[in-house]
Amino acid sequence: MVSKIPDGKFKGLFKLILDENSILRIDGDRRGTRISCIKGAVYITQQNDIKDHVLPADESFLINRQGRIIIWALSAAAIEIDFCDTGRYCLIERLRRFIAMGGL
């Protein structure tokens, strides 16, 4: 089964649990969005990128291209998706989180 996150202006941090072999499709221009694998492992492919990525637990991936993103759970997985656009919102939100974590 393929779950879809439609093209839109989602912003903020979303936590998802994926069953083994489930697929999540993200459409639209999501450059600046960070995908973090909390538990398990996921396979990530993005449109117009010849390189695919395997993301084990405790690693993250930054979307750097426009187009469809496919996330395939290689095992039962927990992921976080930090939707952030490439504009001012993204910069302000990342700075706010950095400060909240004790930076500066």
Image (cartoon, rainbow, N blue to C red):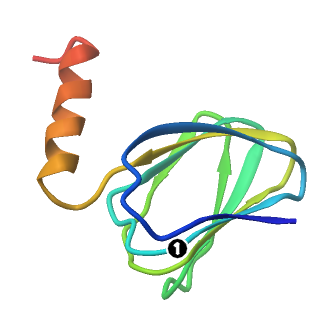
Q: Position of residue 42 (x, y in %)?
A: 72, 53
- Residue at figure coordinates x 32%, y 58% from the top left: 32
Q: Is residue 98 left or right of residue 44?
A: left
- Residue at figure coordinates x 44%, y 75% from the top left: 28
Q: Position of residue 80 (x, y in %)?
A: 56, 39
Q: Amino acid at mark 1?
A: Asp
The part of the image, by quadrant, that contains residue 9 is bottom left
- Indicate the quadrant containing the N terminus: top left, top right, bottom left or bottom right: bottom right
Helix, strand or loop under label 1: loop
Q: Position of residue 35 (x, y in %)?
A: 52, 49
- Indicate the quadrant containing the C terminus: top left, top right, bottom left or bottom right: top left
Q: Is residue 68 left or right of residue 2?
A: left
Q: Is residue 51 above or below residue 57?
A: below
Q: Residue under circle 1?
A: 27
Q: Is residue 85 left or right of residue 3?
A: left
Q: Is 74 or 82 nearer to us in this picture? A: 82
- Residue at figure coordinates x 46%, y 81% from the top left: 67
